[in-house]
Amino acid sequence: DLPFLWVNLANYKVPGDPTNQTYAYLREAQSQALDVENTGQAVTIDIGDPDDIHPTNKQEVGRRLALIAKNRIYRIAVEDSGPMFANVRFAGGALVVTFAHSTGGLVARGHPLDCVEIAGEDQVFHPATVSVNKSVMVALSPLVKQPVAIRYAWRNAPDANLYNGVGLPAVPFRSDNW
């Protein structure tokens, strides 16, 4: 019954990681723990220093944890999470992704989303061109005619810039476990 809140790993260039994905898998494992009741996760993929494992912006980390406590422990209604992958479907050569926690719509801050990749049945991921509208993301690539999988910020230190309208960052995700 005791509430348990944690900070999802920030973006960090993991030394000696030839896959550049070790932290993506660790972040995913952290996010899976949200299935346990009375838990919450503050995402910091956007405020880390890729060269330092500890984000220096501790005030923002604390603010995000406080939003979770405010909403889930003290029952004061506030949005406490950034967009979370909900569903994906194939439509006309593109993948259409819907999100939970997309309050105020999806927003790509600073530049177009460039850490989204899609793959076909061959399981080879390629960078995708992405558009966002309200709580929906549409991703396509001329290199993937029939996409079946999508992933966002699936690197150790991605330049993740997808947010909801209240300024909370999206949780990195992949639609398939390959």
Image (spheres, grey):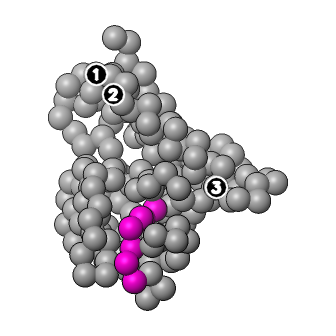
Q: Which residue is mark 3?
A: 21
Q: Quadrant of residue 120?
A: bottom left
Q: Residue furthest bottom?
A: 142
As for residue 146 lying within the magenta part, the answer is yes
Residue displayed at 58% across by 46% down: 25
Q: Secondary structure at mark 1?
A: helix
Say few, some or many: other residues with alpha carbon within 10 Å of mark 3 (under 14 / 14 to 19 / 20 or more). some
Identify the element where label 3 is drawn.
loop
Instruction: For the residues labelled 2 and 1, say whether their Cβ atoms are less than 8 Å apart.
Output: yes
| Marks 3 and 1 in Cβ contact (< 8 Å) | no
- Looking at numbered disc 2 in the image, what kind of residue is underneath it? Ala
Few, some or many residues within 10 Å of mark 2 (<14, 14–19, 20+): many
Residue 15 seen: yes
Q: Position of residue 15 (x, y in %)?
A: 79, 53
What type is the residue that disc 3 sits on? Gln
The magenta segment? 145-152
Q: Provide residue 127's location: percent of width, then percent of height.
A: 51, 77
**What is the number of the mark on residue 73?**
1
User: In the drawing, what numbered circle is on residue 69?
Assistant: 2
Nearer to the camera, 158 or 116? 116
- Nearest to viewer (mark 2 / mark 3): 3
